[in-house]
Image (spheres, rainbow, N blue to C red):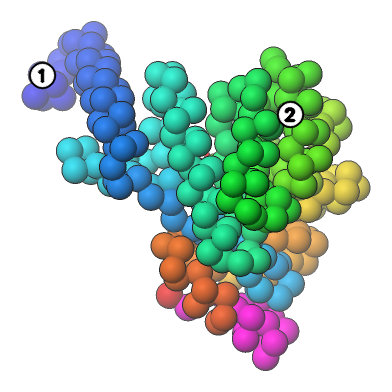
Amino acid sequence: EAKAAGVNGYRVFDDLMEERMSSRVSIRSELARALDTDELTLNYQPLVCAKTGELISVEALLRWNSPRLGQVSPAVLIPIAEESGQIIHLSNWVLDTGLAAIKTLGDVPVGINISPVHFRHSQFATILAEKLIAANVRPELLHLEITEGVLISHMEGAKKTIAQVRKLGCKVYLDDFGTGYSSLSYLQDFELDGMKIDKSFLRDLGERSQATQIMRSVVDLGHSLGLKVVVEGVESEWQARLLQLLNCDILQGFHFATPMVLADIAAFRKLHTAKAETSADLGSAER
Ligand code: C2E
Ligand code: MG
Ligand code: MG
Ligand code: MG
């Protein structure tokens, strides 16, 4: 086994590289098949109002249960698909499936993660417009989540595409805010509807006063630019309460709910509407 034989650093490195390469290749070939079968699914994670705990929207998250590879995380799969070019096919499947979910849910907005590779496609907005018409859903129920990767080195194209999809009526959120390089200038240059503050900002929250001050400043910054401010990765009651005090609009995280199958969203919604009516505090998910 590679690790047991690992007295020589170079050999371990080579073996790991090789292992990585071959899993990359098998992910590619397995994915090609998966796109034509039902191995891919979307799970949906609730986003709730920071003040009332009510369901605001859901985020669609890709799940792949491969018979040969097991569960493959989107964090592993997406970069490989981006490199191989399979992302366009995959991303169109995600969009179609997400649009069908909007139809099923009725009036709950659905957030969909869009790969920079797909978003940069010259026909992105045109094809999206066709899909919206075909699916017959209200565009404002589609929330596109893009990352800084979209904006870097494709400033003008990205600006144009953001304007086009917003003109269609869709909302655009900047995802993973604070994990990249020049987030602040992007906020100024691009017309967005909201920002999702990355979960890494929660790490020292409540422990170091600086972390709380930074969170407060970022939230205020978002608001001063007219953005809805979402915080992701909320895992505890006290984090939720602190974020509410800091004026965050929307919270997402395991404290409220983990990603679930579409059919379970209706029950979550019922529970959370009732809770919001009977108590003024944050409705946390009893799991
Ligand atoms: P993301 O868009 O930032 O999605 C949020 C991730 O945080 C999800 O991981 C979610 O399961 C996880 N999460 C939610 N609440 C908590 C929490 O309280 N604590 C912790 N530790 N994690 C939490 P997931 O599903 O593994 O997805 C990882 C990333 O993969 C996503 O990050 C997104 O960048 C990408 N991704 C997922 N689905 C898609 C897709 O359909 N298309 C594209 N292009 N990317 C996707
Ligand atoms: Mg996201
Ligand atoms: Mg994120
Ligand atoms: Mg992320």
Q: Which mark is residue 161?
A: 2
Say if the magenta span includes residue 39.
Answer: no
Query: Mark 1 against mark 2, which lies toward the viewer?
Result: 2
Viewer-closest of 82 and 38:
38
Q: Is residue 214 in sight in this rendering?
A: no
Quadrant in the picture for residue 239: bottom right
Q: Which quadrant, please, contains the C terminus?
A: bottom left
Label 1: which secondary element: loop
Give the magenta part as a residue range: 272-286
Query: Residue 208's spot in the image, x, y percent?
Result: 67, 51
Rounded to the nearest whole Å, what is the CA distance between mark 1 and mark 2?
51 Å
**First in sequence: mark 1 or mark 2?**
1
**Residue under numbered circle 1:** 5
Residue count near mark 1 (Cα–Cα under 10 Å), binned few <14, some 14–19, many ≥20: few
In the image, is the residue at mark 2 within 8 Å of ligand 1 by its beta carbon? no
Residue type of the residue flagged with mark 2: Thr
Quadrant in the picture for residue 129: top right
Residue count near mark 2 (Cα–Cα under 10 Å), binned few <14, some 14–19, many ≥20: some
Query: Residue 168's spot in the image, x, y percent?
Result: 76, 42
What is the count of numbered marks? 2
Q: Is residue 109 in sight in this rendering?
A: yes
Which residue corresponds to the image point at 28% horizontal and 42% vertical from the top-left? 37
Viewer-closest of 161 and 246:
161
Which residue corresponds to the image point at 80% horizontal and 33% vertical from the top-left? 163
Query: Residue 151's spot in the image, x, y percent?
Result: 70, 25
